Amino acid sequence: MADDNCVFCRISEGLDSSTVLEVENDEFVIFQDIKPASQHHYLAVTKKHYASLKDLNKSHDSLVSRMEIALKDLLASKGVSVDDALFGFHLPPFITVKHLHMHAISPRTQMTFLSKLIFRPSVWFKPVDEARFYLSQKE
Ligand SMILES: [Zn+2]
Ligand SMILES: [Zn+2]
């Protein structure tokens, strides 16, 4: 399902030599966001190309859980706060790369004003719990 023109497809396939993959498994990879919103900012990106959360449904709940757990484990392994962290997804049209990615940002309390706006729970950003509720409503 890879799209040659999609930067996250290339990264998740290990084709972008400038991106260090912190985590890699059969379903997704995790790497640092190139525009960090706080001291630590990682993205979990699926290997399969989904344009956004809107392409997922109920059946993807466990995938979302595994992405969240992997991000939390990575933060913890680096000694970064998991409690003062924000996890979630952007929704179209407020997405810079149109390939599903979960953000993990920590510490949440030290995000800049602009970042707080970009990642504010809203119509354009769904924290992971809201994202899972949204998926649970979809067939
Ligand atoms: Zn893609
Ligand atoms: Zn995003």
Image (tube, rainbow, N blue to C red):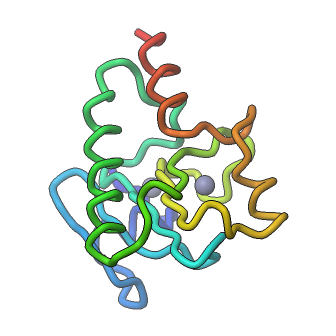
Question: Vertically, is 95 above or below 63?
Answer: below
Q: Is residue 31 left or right of residue 74?
A: right
Furthest residue to the bottom?
Answer: 18
Whole-percent x and y of residue 90? 63, 45
Quadrant of the rendered image holding ligand 1: bottom left
Question: Vertically, is 19 above or below 37?
Answer: below
Q: Residue at x 16, y 55 (%)?
A: 26
Of 4 and 114, which appears nearest the observer? 114
Q: Residue at x 35, y 58 (%)?
A: 71
Q: Quadrant of the C terminus?
A: top left
Q: Is residue 139 left or right of residue 91?
A: left
Q: Residue at x 44, y 42 (%)?
A: 50
Question: Vertically, is 14 above or below 29?
Answer: below
Q: Is residue 115 left or right of residue 77?
A: right
The image quarter containing residue 58 is top left
Whole-percent x and y of residue 112? 77, 70
The image quarter containing residue 124 is top right
Whole-percent x and y of residue 9? 40, 62
Of 29 and 113, which appears nearest the observer? 113
Furthest residue to the left?
Answer: 26
Q: Residue at x 46, y 68 (%)?
A: 42
- Tally the marks: 0
